[in-house]
């Protein structure tokens, strides 16, 4: 499958999408902290939300919205600086007011606008400031503001995360996918959040879209870990307005469906990897691949367990080829395992075979691990299940950042 | 239930127990690194092992031994400096040779000696040195060496962990329980290990002993977390020689059974807490209590999830009364939860009620958290399930220790 990666692609790279930003001084000053994203036509949409039982007000709003609207949306409003979580009934009213303000300002039908918030929790939302920002933003909607939007949704991110891909469907129509994301996982002070928005001009049936998003998320945003903490606000939204004019994709197993899914997965994976690379305190980007597992689910469980182990992550920080900690994590992961069949590679160097350590050049292995990008490969030798996940190392800087008193 | 805590009590405080140590230079020099513990009479025994699928050779040996011997043991040999893990068939032979050497040297029946190892993994065991050490140790067995034994099994522990309790059973007989433990959880470099040994002179039926040990472990060693990593060698062993002469305890629900269980739980809990207090890089000892849960299992799941969260642990390091991270951990723990019923206290100060933050004195709360001992209490407001677990904070020092290249 060939995709074209667009130079400086972003969330409004697809046809029929416009975005605007505003500075509302929700928490930050001197920067935009609100983005308003709108499609020229109604969209087929799908969303995936945090599994945390403590859900922020916008998540609760959106869960009900997706039922009421059957996923037919026109746009999204998102703010940074306040997560609107643990804010009680006033928080629910604030989320609703944000959606109503957009619908009213742009003359959209009721229940067509999705809401996202990220930032500090337990602080009342400054609704008047946000509504005023929405009114200003509505005046400047443009396809040219995609990168500004990726900046406006940042909290402690050090850089904006945005991307667009173009592909020609096997049936002949070119379509575009654009996206943006924020948040270094769940590692930020004040419970910051992973938010990701993907837009497209493809025409696609709602149930196919939903299935595609779940498959893509499994291989991207749900395959990263920074510290294992799951936020109250995590949300991934996909909206497709059909403006590309392709014959609507009505099966994921069709040629067009497979091509779209591959592109969507690639886009989500790239954004997810950007989130990991920008992890707080991270000094290495780590790819963990498990193969030979009893199933994909087992492989992913094993890989995510390695990715979450503080002992593995601190060893990676120290460029220590500590195969024992990786084998240990495999052992308690819950995945089916026969230790005597395990083969481990660090950066392509075989360090363990048949469950026994090989004599390898520790200095060379340490050199391999002392790079900005590191790979760990585990072959469980049981069957054909495989999975790849991404994580970062665990540094003293992470502790310093997260131990700082909230200000 | 009243227990007498013995001054400087240890693993041979109960009647009929002797121990000796030896310096074998397995890894360390200038210190003892082997302990040999023997009962004057055969013991009823029970053991709990790591759930890690990667099991060290001594764990594999002991699992089979407990079947062959039906738990009737005379003693234990334990070494520090080499975990005898990931050592293949030679490792199995080494574990067996250690047991055989003790049995032969002391003229014991075959299959009466338990084996434990802790230290570096993936390194062949120096069997000849260890057997020579066993021969020397066999000459110096004495009830007076209990504290020396607790020192001999240390790896990167900063202090020995030992304790003994005396109680008079309701039926009138005084009995003693003694114990020792090592390992700051699973946080040490080279995958160090939690080992704990409890001895007693009580007379007790095997099935009752096994049930008692499982109950006590649930409330002690299985209620602590330092980093969530589970070692390949973790073992808890309980041996009772019956020399106290009480009418054998044949029901856990009897008055004597309940008294013994309470004392065993107290002893295990104190040793487990010592392990947490000695956690690498730890600056605070944290007690996390969850009540009002749907069940004990739910309460423990919630409490252990808080105890493992890097965000909570770094906040505690920074004396940050960050109720949001605790609520977030409750939310993703998997325990049944209605966020709007949750009440949180930090060090007795109420910070959250009905799922909403209270306005509290942040400086005072930070002062409370800036102590060596800290308590977090969560009331889920659902039912009567409760659990208490213990953990430590997560410091930059932990990262530094565990990121150091293995030497």
Image (cartoon, coloured by chain):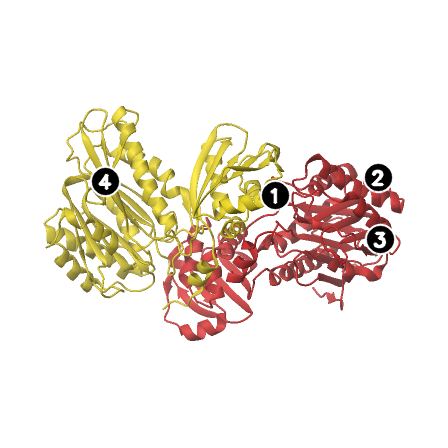
Chain colours: A yellow, B red
Residue in the foreground of this view, choosing between B362 and A365: A365
Front disc: 4 or 2: 4
Q: Are marks 2 and 1 in contact (CB under 8 Å)?
A: no
Front disc: 3 or 2: 3
Q: Are marks 3 and 2 in contact (CB under 8 Å)?
A: no
Q: Secondary structure at mark 2?
A: loop
Q: Which residue is mark 1?
A: B51
Residue in the foreground of this view, choosing between A115 and A378: A378
Instruction: Tell me residue B384's x, y (percent).
Output: 51, 56
Q: Which residue is mark 2?
A: B110
Q: Which residue is mark 3?
A: B137
Q: CA distance from mark 2 to mark 1?
A: 27 Å
Going by the image, does B383 lie left or right of A250? right
Instruction: Tell me residue A288's x, y (percent).
Output: 46, 40
Which of the 4 image quarters holds residue A208? top left
Residue in the foreground of this view, choosing between B172 and B335: B335
Q: CA distance from mark 1 to mark 3?
A: 32 Å
Q: CA distance from mark 3 to mark 2?
A: 19 Å
- Give the mark, 3 or 2, whose residue is nearer the N terminus: 2
Q: Which residue is mark 4?
A: A6
Tell me if mark 3 has few (under 14), some (14-19) or many (20+) residues whose alpha carbon lies within 10 angstroms of its own. many
């Amino acid at each position: 499958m060939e995709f074209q990666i667009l130079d400086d692609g972003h969330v409004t790279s697809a046809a029929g999408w416009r975005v605007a930003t505003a500075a509302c001084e929700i928490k930050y000053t001197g920067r935009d902290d609100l983005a308003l994203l709108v499609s020229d036509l109604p969209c087929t949409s799908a969303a995936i939300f945090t599994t945390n039982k403590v859900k922020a007000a916008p998540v609760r709003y959106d869960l009900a919205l997706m039922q009421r609207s059957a996923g037919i949306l026109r746009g999204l409003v998102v703010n940074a600086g306040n997560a609107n979580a643990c804010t009680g009934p006033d928080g629910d009213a604030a989320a609703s007011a944000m959606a109503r303000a957009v619908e009213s300002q742009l003359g959209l039908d009721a229940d067509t606008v999705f809401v996202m918030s990220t930032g500090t929790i337990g602080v009342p939302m400054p609704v008047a400031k946000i509504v005023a920002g929405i009114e200003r933003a509505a005046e400047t909607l443009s396809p040219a503001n995609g990168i500004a939007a990726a900046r406006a949704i940042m909290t402690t991110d050090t850089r904006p995360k945005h991307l667009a891909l173009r592909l020609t469907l096997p049936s002949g129509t070119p379509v575009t996918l654009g996206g943006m994301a924020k948040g270094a996982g769940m590692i930020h002070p004040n419970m910051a959040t992973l938010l990701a928005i993907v837009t497209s001009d493809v025409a696609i049936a709602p149930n196919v879209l939903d299935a595609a998003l779940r498959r893509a998320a499994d291989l991207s945003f749900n395959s990263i870990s920074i510290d294992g903490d799951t936020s109250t606000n995590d949300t991934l939204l996909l909206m497709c307005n059909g403006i590309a004019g392709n014959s609507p994709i009505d099966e994921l197993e069709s040629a067009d469906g497979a091509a779209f899914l591959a592109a969507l997965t690639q886009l989500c994976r790239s954004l997810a990897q950007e989130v990991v690379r920008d992890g707080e305190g991270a000094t290495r980007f780590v790819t963990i691949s498990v193969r030979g597992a009893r199933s994909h689910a087992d492989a992913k469980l094993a890989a995510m367990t390695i990715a979450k182990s503080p002992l593995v992550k601190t060893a990676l920080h120290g460029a220590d080829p500590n195969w024992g900690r990786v084998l240990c994590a495999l052992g308690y992961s819950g995945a089916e395992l026969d230790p005597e069949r395990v083969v481990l590679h660090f950066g392509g160097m075989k360090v363990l075979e048949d469950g026994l350590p090989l004599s390898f050049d520790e200095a060379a292995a340490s050199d391999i691990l002392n790079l900005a990008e590191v790979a760990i490969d585990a072959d469980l030798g049981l069957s054909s299940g495989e999975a790849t996940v991404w994580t970062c190392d665990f540094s003293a800087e992470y502790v310093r950042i997260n131990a700082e008193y909230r200000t």
